[in-house]
Image (spheres, helix red, strand yellow):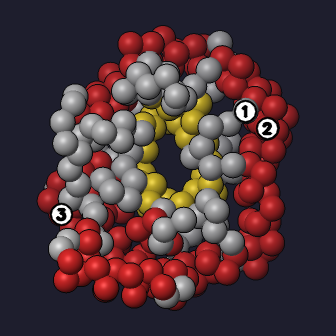
Amino acid sequence: MKGPRRSTGRFLGALDEGPGFTGIRAMTDDLPDAAHATDRLASVRTQIARACKDAGRDPSEVTLVAVSKTFDAGAIEPVIAAGQRVFGENRVQEAKGKWPPLMQTQAGIQLHLIGPLQSNKAKEAVALFDAIHSIDRDSLCEALAKEIAAQKRDPLLFAQINTGAEPQKAGVLPQDADAFLKKCAETYGLRISGLMCIPPADEAPGPHFALTAKIARRNGLKLLSMGMSADFADAILLGATHVRVGSAIFGGR
């Protein structure tokens, strides 16, 4: 899978090319990111529509998850005002601190946990999140099954696949995915709806997206959480139903 990482989804790349553009990029970076967030959101939506057209898909098939990790309410509110309702967070504690007040005043918000989840945070995660993208081990399955039953909630569940077999990353190895998905259902009674992957940073993402889609198909799973700011258009071409886009909307962290 080695090779240069390409992207059809990097829409700010042209601003970085050549010395003539350095001043433009620096001037843009000096402005408040929140002031540009709605423009960035509109650009991302346009790119999603274009990628769907190229893939022969309906844009309604793709959910944009705006990744708001590390950003405060002041940065998030303009994006909500522009119509975005699905947001992603990496950490339970951070989400608990900022989202309940926002959700009291904003209707229809959906929260997705896209980062690793500790088993001892399962109770809080089930209470707060509408989707969990990072299921990858027995202890977490057991904890989630217990809390889903106790709280009578039904979050959307994704198993994370470590397509690059990277030791520093969470996720089930591809060769273990079928057995893990079977165990989720038969042992823990979890309804896994899709798969999530994060390709290695130094490899082309396409083969990793294709592998994840192949595992999903043979297990009868319809949802694919694939693609981030640099590669979401590529992911859509390969079947992504959920794209996790942060810096392309909110700016650099």
| Foreground tag (1 vs 3) | 1
Identified at 69% across, 25% down, the residue is 140
Q: Position of residue 70 (x, y in %)?
A: 64, 62
Separation of disc 1 and disc 3 at Cα?
A: 39 Å
Amino acid marked by disc 2: Lys
**Toward which corner of the image does residue 80 lie, by quadrant?**
bottom right
Res. 191 mark: none
Res. 121 mark: 2
Q: Which residue is mark 1?
A: 118
Amino acid marked by disc 3: Lys
Q: Which residue is mark 3?
A: 53
Judged left or right of residue 178, residue 35 is: right
**Toward which corner of the image does residue 97 lie, by quadrant?**
bottom right
**Few, some or many residues within 10 Å of mark 1 (<14, 14–19, 20+):** some
Element class at badge 1: loop
| Foreground tag (3 vs 2) | 2
**Few, some or many residues within 10 Å of mark 3 (<14, 14–19, 20+):** some
Q: Residue furthest front?
A: 19
Judged left or right of residue 172, residue 143 is: right
Separation of disc 1 and disc 2 at Cα?
A: 5 Å
**Few, some or many residues within 10 Å of mark 2 (<14, 14–19, 20+):** some
Q: Position of residue 114 (x, y in %)?
A: 57, 46
Q: Which quadrant would the N terminus be assigned to in this image?
A: top left
Identify the mark nearer the N-term, 3 or 2. 3
Separation of disc 3 and disc 2 at Cα?
A: 40 Å
